[in-house]
Amino acid sequence: MRMKHKNGEWVWINSRGKVSSRTSDGNAEWLLGTHFDINDRMRAENSLNDTSKQMQAIVESMLDGVIGSDEQGIVLTFNQSAENIFGYNANEIINTNISMLMGYPYRKHNYNYLSNYVNRGIIELDALHKNGTTFPIELSVVDVQVSGKTNFIGIVRDISQRKKREQEIYQLAFYDPLTQLPNRRLLLDKLQDAIANCSRDNKFVALLFLDLDNFKHLNDSAGHNKGDLLLCLVAERLVQSVRQEDIVSRLGGDEFVVIIASLSTDEQTAANQAESIAQKIITNLTPEYDLGGLIHNSSASIGVTMFNGANISKEELLKQADMAMYKAKDTGRNAVQFFDPLMQVAVSLRATLVHDLYVAIQKRQFILYYQKQVDQQGKVIGVEVLLRWLHPLKGMISPAEFIPLAEETGLIVPVGEWVLQQACKTLALWANVPARAKLTISVNISLVQFSKKNFVGTVNDALNNSGANPKLLKLEITETLLASNIPDVKAKMRALQQHGITFSIDDFGTGYSSLSYLQQLPINQLKIDQGFVRDIINSSNDKAIAQAVITLASSMNLHVIAEGVETEAQRMLLQSMGCYSYQGYLFGRPVTLEELVIA
């Protein structure tokens, strides 16, 4: 190809792009040092363009946001992932200041924002979405030189989901999934911190161990969903009862632990402060609970231990508070007790007794005693069966000592089933003895036992297996049982009544049953508690209560019987008041079946 040079001469460019001129003889003379390769440059430019396009494609396809800015923080580039992360499209953000993407307090850095993070590795901070919400990101920044100026490239990763997963893992590890309270693991950490802190500032700390009273009965009778709902409501009331800096945790089951820190440096003052908080908890937990339509009354027993030094382990503190809690239950529940070293002895004895109870069930160490029930002519109309425990080493153990323990541990269920079976067998044997064929046998039924879902089947099995007459079996239940779960109690009583079984309210007047309960339930008999009979001759109050029970029974067409009658004067006064059935030492002490004499 011929082209004209700037000096006026014609030059030729061959196929390889080399330049030559013509000599006088017409031959081409190649110009040394002045030739260039146009194709190479074109190929280089094309290659550079291709590389640029590839890099742009890579940047656009990255999962991380890539943001470029100048030294003043003006956004120069904004890839697709950055658009997805921040909610802006590139046109909205390019040529604006990058600070609009940052949440406080980072936003105040303004123009030199990215330069603060150059070569600092990956950092975490809060970013600002277009919709105004903040979210966590990871950011790394590098600087680049472009035409003698410094620009910055920020690599951004949205870590919202990762943070959420981390929080979920932390929540599962340290918090109770039901109540959302700190669990045992976090409690122990907090307790260790409290020990260290009180050792430093000499302020006392109180550890409260709380257990719901009769929670197991609610679970057994109403189901675990109702029990779970109660636990959640109790957790809410506990949090509302203490200070914001105090720790409320769920240890497990129906057990809660509260750490009350920063009390007085004076032990007695600190104890008074802890007592006040514990009593506030007791008060706040007392009002009734609406468990999805089931109205339930609950209470709690609280054990308290105090400390202000580092010379005790957290395990020992929990043990002390636990022992104090059991002392609160022993005093009648719904109470507060502080730890006393003597409790250790009591706890050891209790543990031994629980072990012995298991052995007693396995080796059949229980004995049944029978006490007569008579009418106004002194004729025997029935007996009440009473449980006794003949310990091989300790001798006869009082029911007042082992029955509450059996109820707490649930051992009363197998023991109660055995009593029912034996009573039904006795009824079946008496059916062939004319003098005893019409006698009733009264069996005490524990709230724990009655609350079992299979209770009706257990009673019917005992009757069917023995062949006893259901009409001669009388089940004695307490007022506490009546108030536990009316629909469940009513259904079970109706089912058993259809078979002819009758019901007596034991120790009537000592609990908190209402007339509405008595009207709803198929009750046959009220039993005047011996506490009202013992001083009925001299106490006008006891006499008035006994009279009220008798009058109530008469108005509702219920039979009434007085227990604990020991003198003829008591019997005569009761008879004059309208009570014509009695039970007590006046007519005979409890005896074994072999010793029982029916005239």
Image (cartoon, rainbow, N blue to C red):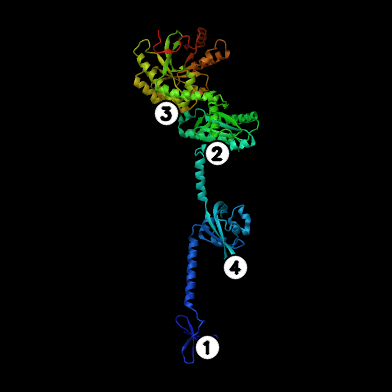
The answer to which of marks 4 and 3 sits earlier in the sequence is 4
Q: Are marks 2 and 3 in contact (CB under 8 Å)?
A: no
Q: Which residue is most to the front? A: 311
> Which is in the foreground here, disc 1 or disc 2?
2
Please tell me whether mark 2 sits on a helix, a strand or a loop.
helix
| Residue at 50% across, 32% down | 254
Residue under pointer 3: 453
The answer to which of marks 2 and 3 sits earlier in the sequence is 2
**What is the spatial separation of the Cα atoms under label 1 and label 3, in whole angstroms?**
117 Å
| Residue 204 falls left or right of residue 577 | right
Residue type of the residue flagged with mark 2? Asp
| Residue at 40% across, 25% down | 456
Please tell me whether mark 4 sits on a helix, a strand or a loop.
loop
Q: Position of residue 409 (x, y in %)?
A: 46, 26
| Residue at 48% across, 87% down | 29
> Which is in the foreground here, disc 4 or disc 3?
4
Q: Are marks 4 and 3 in contact (CB under 8 Å)?
A: no
26 w.r.t. 462: above or below = below
Q: Position of residue 194 (x, y in %)?
A: 59, 36
Residue type of the residue flagged with mark 1? Glu
Residue under pointer 2: 189
**What is the spatial separation of the Cα atoms under label 4 and label 3, in whole angstroms?**
85 Å
| Residue at 48% across, 66% down | 53
**What is the spatial separation of the Cα atoms under label 4 and label 1, in whole angstroms?**
41 Å
Residue under pointer 4: 148
Residue under pointer 1: 9
